[in-house]
Image: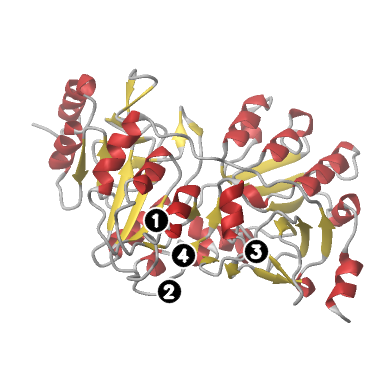
């Protein structure tokens, strides 16, 4: 059978594609940009029509469509959302739920998510957005290899939503028509997250980090104003490489100008490695059919043993708070999940294990317009994203400190020195109370 005939046999309406779902099954959705909006709306319609009464929902970085359909309060008694990383849309949906416990956050470091969603959690159905099929019968996962490249090989039933706006990318993003069970078509603009202009504080922090990045380093940049601002300071650098969880718009200019070329990477030279992409249409267009942009599953990209293979690996991520011992919280705010464990610890460990590697965790010294310190005596709620043994450089607008090899008293003094001056005495007093300072 030729591939076009096979395609037509598997092509159907979204409502019909969702009939495969049964009561109390596990539905896994593609992450972020790869969330299939038409299929999500169809599943919500089935639940509203009582075609089945319970569904376990696993995903990362929910979309607006998800928030407005499957996560709406009217379906709270039928859908059990279990996000492994939360977006602003997830946080908004959580506030609308009659009971916050109805959304069950799943802690997981990113490089293990593909395994969790195929071994610990039975993958009954996987739904994801893909690019159109090429002449050889292959779709592309485009912006999202992440856990999708792992789950799509092992899910019991695979439904793809074909969108002509999804870029075609290389690496481990190809999926053959024979590997999917059902196809629907829905051509709509991809979700965008244009970068926000960095604040004055972000720029100060970014400059401190950029000064410690050398020609020939390989980069990983996390989400947030500081990582993007760091990239803006690297325009005069030479021969940088990219092995990053996230591909973002600020990287495009550096690739186009030749600053990021991968020439001195220890392996996979001249290839720009990512596992998920989130940005604007111009970035998606740049990725499309670009052989230098290669996506691989997070189980590989984020594996510390893989990260460390590139010498001079530099990791830059953001945090919510750091305590006086060097523990990092990058996922919880006011006692509630704010984002997720994600891949920060993966790269903190992988970068430090790299020969000549460095790991930076950045945060503003205060929050709520200066009302609270983000360097704290103890982390709230027990959410430890990076252990004190793993943390290397911590950076605020008041300085950059390397915690590796420092005793607990030395760590406390170093962190207090880069806290906001208005809170330093309070932190000194707390350090004495904890026995960190004499």
Q: Are marks 4 and 3 in contact (CB under 8 Å)?
A: no
Decide which of tag 1 and tag 2 comes sooner along the chain.
1
Mark nearer the viewer, 3 or 1: 3
Q: Give the residue drawn at x 28%, y 48%.
A: 210
Q: Nearer the viewer, residue 317 or 344?
A: 317
Sequence-first disc among 3 and 1: 3
Task: Find disc 1 in the rendering and name its residue.
Answer: 220
Which corner quadrant holds the N terminus?
bottom right
* Viewer-nearest of discs 2 and 3: 3
- Kindly check if marks 4 and 2 are in contact, taking CB atoms under 8 A apart as contact: no
Q: Is residue 323 left or right of residue 277?
A: left
Q: CA distance from mark 4 to mark 2?
A: 8 Å
**Residue situated furthest left in the rendering:** 438
Instruction: Tell me the quarter of the picture where residue 136 sits.
Output: bottom right
- In the rendered image, the vertical position of residue 436 relative to residue 428, given as above or below: below
Residue at mark 4: 272
Estimate the x, y position of residue 56 in percent, counting from the top left: 72, 47
How far apart in space, not on screen, are marks 2 and 3 (Cα)?
A: 20 Å
Q: Are marks 2 and 3 in contact (CB under 8 Å)?
A: no
Q: CA distance from mark 3 to mark 1?
A: 22 Å
- Whole-number angstrom distance, CA of label 1 to CA of label 4: 11 Å
Query: Tag 3 or tag 4, which sits nearer the N-term?
Result: 3
6 on left or right of 154: right
User: What residue sits right under mark 3 in the picture?
Assistant: 168
């Amino acid at each position: 059978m030729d591939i076009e005939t096979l395609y037509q046999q598997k092509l159907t309406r979204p409502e019909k594609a969702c009939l495969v779902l049964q009561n109390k099954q596990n539905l896994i959705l593609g992450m972020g940009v790869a969330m299939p909006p038409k299929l999500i709306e169809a599943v919500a319609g089935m639940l509203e029509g009582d075609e089945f009464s319970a569904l376990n929902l696993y995903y990362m970085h929910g979309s607006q469509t998800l928030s407005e359909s499957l996560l709406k309060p009217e379906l709270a008694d039928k859908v059990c959302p279990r996000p492994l990383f939360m977006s602003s849309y997830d946080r908004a949906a959580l506030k609308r739920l009659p009971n916050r416990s109805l959304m069950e956050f799943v802690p997981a470091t990113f490089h293990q998510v593909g395994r969790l969603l195929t071994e610990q959690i039975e993958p009954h159905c996987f739904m994801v957005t893909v690019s159109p099929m090429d002449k050889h019968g292959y779709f592309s996962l485009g912006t999202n290899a992440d856990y999708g490249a792992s789950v799509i090989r092992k899910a019991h039933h695979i439904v793809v939503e074909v969108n002509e706006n999804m870029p075609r990318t290389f690496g481990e993003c190809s999926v053959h028509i024979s590997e999917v069970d059902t196809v629907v078509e829905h051509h709509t603009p991809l979700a965008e997250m244009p970068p926000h202009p960095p604040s004055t504080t972000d720029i100060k922090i970014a400059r401190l980090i950029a000064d410690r990045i050398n020609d020939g380093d390989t980069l990983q940049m996390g989400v947030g104003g500081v990582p993007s601002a760091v990239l803006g300071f690297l325009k005069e650098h030479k021969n940088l490489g990219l092995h990053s969880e996230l591909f973002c718009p600020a990287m495009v200019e550096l690739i186009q100008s030749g600053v990021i070329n991968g020439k001195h990477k220890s392996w996979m030279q001249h290839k720009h490695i990512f596992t998920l992409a989130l940005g604007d249409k111009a970035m998606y267009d740049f990725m499309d059919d670009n052989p230098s942009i290669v996506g691989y599953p997070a189980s590989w990209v984020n594996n510390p043993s893989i990260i460390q293979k590139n010498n001079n690996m530099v990791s830059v991520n953001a945090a919510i708070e750091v305590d006086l011992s060097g523990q990092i919280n990058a996922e919880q705010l006011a006692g509630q999940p704010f984002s997720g464990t994600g891949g920060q610890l993966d790269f903190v460990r992988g970068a430090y294990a790299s020969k000549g590697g460095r790991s930076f965790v950045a945060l503003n010294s205060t929050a709520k317009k200066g009302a609270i310190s983000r360097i704290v005596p103890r982390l709230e709620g027990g959410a430890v994203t990076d252990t004190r043994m793993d943390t290397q450089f911590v950076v605020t607008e008041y300085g950059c400190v390397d915690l590796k090899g420092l005793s607990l008293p030395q760590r406390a003094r170093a962190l207090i020195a880069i806290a906001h001056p208005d809170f330093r005495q309070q932190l000194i007093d707390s350090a004495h109370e904890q026995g960190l300072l004499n």
